[in-house]
Image (cartoon, helix red, strand yellow):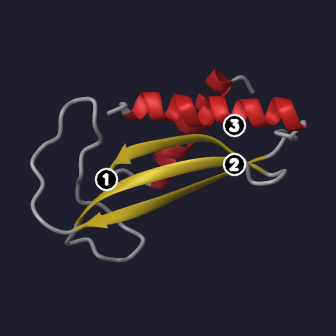
Amino acid sequence: MPSLLQLAGIVGSIGASAIAEFGIDVARIHWDMTSISLYGAYRSPDTDHIEPRFGHPKDRRPDLLQVQAGLAVSADGGIPIWLRAYDGGAGEVVKASPSNGGTCHVGW
């Protein structure tokens, strides 16, 4: 099973290929985060996986563990160009700044 880093690389390479092939404008990128609430018991994951944690989920259920995901798409056509999964618990603002810099690694 591929790691999260490998999956992000796959999505980035597909996005880069689409941008090159179809001339998609990436001067503007839309970034969105979402939280995913989890039900049940979860033991601590391996170090290369995200960790479910308590936080401030958008569904207003702070009693549930959560994980978070962020996705960057081109403003021109909504082509996914970058994604990342995050541990639950940290604020969205904390993640947005370092994540936006991550798009530079994809070539923009």
C-alpha gap between disc 2 and disc 3: 9 Å
Residue 66 horizontal side relative to residue 95, left or right: left
Residue at 77% in and 37% down? 18
SS of the residue at dot 3?
Answer: helix
Residue 18 horizontal side relative to residue 9, left or right: right
SS of the residue at dot 2?
Answer: strand
C-alpha gap between disc 3 and disc 1: 26 Å
Residue at 48% in and 41% down? 84
Q: Position of residue 15 (x, y in %)?
A: 69, 37
In which quarter of the view is residue 99 placed? top right
Q: Which residue is mark 2?
A: 73
C-alpha gap between disc 2 and disc 1: 22 Å
Q: Which residue is mark 1?
A: 88
Q: Earlier in the sequence, mark 3 or mark 1?
A: 3
User: Mark 1 and mark 3 in contact (Cβ < 8 Å)?
Assistant: no
- Work out which quarter of the rendered image holds the N terminus and state it: top left
Q: Earlier in the sequence, mark 2 or mark 1?
A: 2
SS of the residue at dot 1?
Answer: loop
The residue furthest bottom is 60
Identified by mark 3, the residue type is: Gly
Q: Position of residue 36 (x, y in %)?
A: 36, 63
In which quarter of the view is residue 60 placed? bottom left
Identified by mark 1, the residue type is: Gly
Identified by mark 2, the residue type is: Val
Disc 3 crowd rating (10 Å Cα; few below 14, some 14-19, many 20+) is many
Q: 68 or 20: which is nearer to us? A: 20
User: Mark 1 and mark 2 in contact (Cβ < 8 Å)?
Assistant: no
Q: Position of residue 65 (x, y in %)?
A: 22, 62
- Marks counted in the figure total 3
99 over 107 or under it: above or below? below
Residue 15 circle label: 3
Q: Position of residue 102 (x, y in %)?
A: 58, 30
